[in-house]
Image: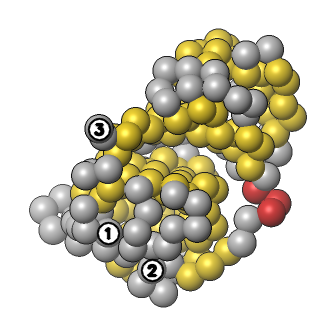
Amino acid sequence: MTGAPILLRAATRERRPWKNGGGRTSDVVVFPAGSGLDDFAWRISIADVEADGPFSVFPMAERHIVILAGTLRLRFDDRDRILSAGDAPFSFPGAAPVTGHPVDGPARDLNLMVRTDRCDGHLRIIAPGQARAGSPVTIVVAPRAATVTVDGATFALDAEDALLLLGPADIDSASPLILAELRPIA
């Protein structure tokens, strides 16, 4: 790994309105740093979906979502998709018209958005144990409090804390983790 992991504490995140104003979100990390909603290369955020409503539209972006709590029905023009905590990540175009419908109470989700002309990225959930992060940039998110070891350095993470890793790394945890793996397009 190039450089030490950067700890991104959930407790320090600011909540702000969604792009369409329909809810609130907090950025885990955005690249380039200081980018807004229209000029990021990639961004990871956590949002609460408390009521039915449209998702914000992000042309030229691919969205990847994993549910942290609750259940969310995504309604597209041609299909519905129900996602619950514990399900595999789900991907869809950021330009797609989609509405979110929380089922039996609010839902909380982690979003990775990547500009398809600047970056490739995806989310994956790793089971407890050892895993290898091989991308140039990896963000490790702890859905719940966890002790995580990265290349021999140990971190106590609170729920929704994250680690930013630059370069390949070995990861070990007794808890499941979410990895966002990113690779710039040359």
Q: Which residue is mark 2?
A: 19
Q: Nearer the viewer, mark 3 or mark 1?
A: 3
Residue found at the far left of this picture: 78
Report how far apart the C-alphas of labels 3 and 1 lie in the structure. Answer: 22 Å
**Residue appearing at x 38%, y 61% in the figure:** 73
Determine which of the numbered discs, if any, sits on residue 186 in the image. 3
Q: Nearer the viewer, mark 2 or mark 3?
A: 3
Q: Amino acid at mark 3?
A: Ala
Q: Is 170 displayed left or right of 62 in the figure?
A: right
Whether residue 117 can be seen here:
yes
Looking at the rendering, which quadrant does residue 154 occupy?
A: top right
Element assignment for label 1 = loop
Report how far apart the C-alphas of labels 2 and 1 lie in the structure. Answer: 9 Å
Q: Which residue is mark 1?
A: 58
Circles 2 and 1, Cβ within 8 Å, touching? The answer is yes
Q: Amino acid at mark 2?
A: Lys
